[in-house]
Image (cartoon, helix red, strand yellow):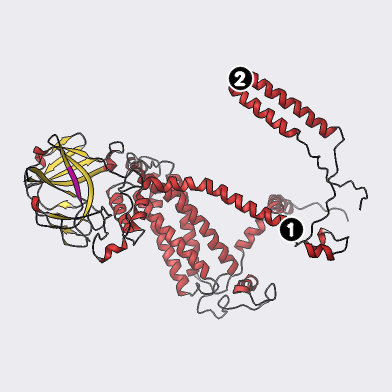
Amino acid sequence: MTEPHDDHPHVPGPSLWPVGFAVGIVVLLVGVIISWWVAGLGGLIALAFAFLWVRDLTAGTPLAHAPEVAPETGGAAAADAPATATIHEDAEERYPRSKFLELSTLGLGGVIGGIVTAPAIGFMVAPAFLKQGQKDHDLGPISDFPEGKYVIATYMADKSQGEVSRRTAFVRYNGQLKGQPSFTIISNHCAHLGCPVQANGPLDEKNTKTFGDVTLIPTVSIAGFGCPCHGGQYNTEGNRIAGPPVRALDRYAFSIRNGRLFIGKPFSVSHVDGAGSSAVIHKWAFSFPGEHVNGLESWLYPIQPPH
Amino acid sequence: MATRRLTRKEQMQQAILYPVDWLEERSGLVGAVKYFLFRKVPGDTNWFQTLGSATLTAFIVQALTGTILAMYYKPDPNSAYDSIQHITNDIWAGWLVRGMHRWGASVFIILMFMHMGRVFLFGAYKYPRELNWIIGVLLLASGLGEGFTGYLLPWDQTAYWATVVGININGTAPFLGPFLAQFLQGGTYINADTLSRFYAIHMLMIPGAIAALIGLHLYLVIRLGVTSPPWSKEAAGTGPLDGETPNGKVGRAGLSRFRRGR
């Protein structure tokens, strides 16, 4: 059992000196930032512990042989096995400790992976759903909008994003309703799959007005809206009259401040009864094109993401 | 016996073989490549069975040309269109590389479908190769995803509105559709982040997935072997093969039979 061998594993004896050495190095590095005195102190600590450590290793005293550890064996097997049983007899045997190490490796790995992955996934997904609200945008004095005629208004929803945020809306002044100006503001996003609907009728492009990022193109007289992609057709109130769209065109809320028209948040419309200022608008939460907002099919979209 | 002087030819052979042997001894790579390339295949395979490797070649062409295009392309709403014009009109051979990528995309998709058709008509999706069919379907979906995300990158009117329509088609999927659409365009509307988002998906996420799936696809092809055509008299690879299984059992899930069978 104890025959002298040269091939014993030469493991250094247990020692606390490296911990002190590491602390010294940390103090040294912190000192580089804070003050040279601290750095010097750290250097001294590191040197002192390095000396003790090296002396420990070289003085020969505890250059201990690794302690002879009897191979661990599972309870019943250990009792039956002869005293000479060695680890080589059953290489397949598993130790409780190895199971623990396996589980802790997997567990720790999972935790570390989760800590790293969760923020990255969140960074990928969350911005698409946060801060989606749209700010009201100034479309100019209401005197720019002749009664009963549509004006095609384009504007940048977010100037910091530039042209990519440009939107188009069809704006019609409906005259006064109970002493307040009434507007119909229709989105140009086709309710089929979001292509830009066009005004069906001649434009009065000579009288185009431009200020800031807003462009207003008056129309002479239009008979409704049509989509160039798949042929959806809408009447002047935005109701679907032909083609594949599933609902009426979306509309925008609006407000008037100091005689100027501000375009507000979009909302979806299933259909509109009547016309102009007396129209009854069946309003629903803003939904993506192609989604039914009412009826049986709307059950397919029970939850809308925050728009 | 005295050592004979090596002939010139033998010297040459040794000089050539030395680095190969060096590599083989340290990595086993030469053997692995031989194992991969010099497999036994049924004697009556035909040209239809080259469609898979043709698809792989098309993917490699896409990966190479795409990587080079990425050196000049700028995924930014304000400069994307101009950088495409620059690639096409100004940079030497830019029109060629962009054309290879643009038309190669169609070639890749068409070849995937033809390969799929061959596998279907030859019955090569049947036991024990069902899993490889499933991986192939995932590859097809990833390839179509590449087509969808790549279509936006020229950032012209066609690209923009086709992508609007594509995103909104995703949006009409039941229940999660609206969330998928909003995730894809990174907001309620197409915005400044959408283009770079599509670019990252197009050139990092999906190609990585495709490369990994191709690895699995080829692994299963090598493990299970090539199927004979349906009219084959050899019937190799069309049914359980003779030969012992490694562990003497009738194969668990049948796979061990095929490991030895070839």
Asked whether residue B247 is in view, the answer is: yes
In the image, farthest residue toward the bottom: B233
Give the secondary structure at mark 2.
loop
Across and down, in percent, residue B185 comes to 35, 49
Q: Is residue B237 left or right of residue A214?
A: right
Q: Name the image quarter holding the C terminus of chain B.
A: bottom right
Residue A173: image quadrant is: top left
Residue A96: image quadrant is: bottom right
Across and down, in percent, residue A290 comes to 26, 59
Q: Is residue B20 left or right of residue A262?
A: right
In terms of sequence position, does the residue under pointer 1 or pointer 2 come before the other? 2
Q: Is residue A182 above or below residue A47?
A: below
Q: Which residue is mark 2?
A: A35
Q: Which residue is mark 1?
A: A95
Residue at (6, 43) in percent of width and height: A179
Label 2: few (<14), some (14–19) or many (≥20) C-alpha neighbours in 10 Å: few
Q: Nearer the viewer, residue B8 or B158?
A: B158
Q: Which residues are magenta?
A: A250-254
Across and down, in percent, residue B99 comes to 38, 50
Q: Is residue A12 left or right of residue B41?
A: right
Residue at (48, 61) in percent of width and height: B54
Label 1: few (<14), some (14–19) or many (≥20) C-alpha neighbours in 10 Å: few
Task: Kindly indicate whether the residue at mark 2 contacts the one at mark 1 (C-beta within 8 angstroms).
Answer: no
Q: Is residue B253 above or below residue B99?
A: below
Q: Nearer the viewer, residue B99 or A90?
A: A90
Across and down, in percent, residue B57 comes to 48, 57
Quote the CA–CA distance across marks 1 and 2: 51 Å
Q: Same chain for marks 1 and 2?
A: yes
- Assign the magenta stretch its main secondary structure: strand
Q: Name the image quarter holding the N terminus of chain B.
A: bottom right
Q: Chain of mark 2?
A: A
Asked whether residue A222 is in view, the answer is: no
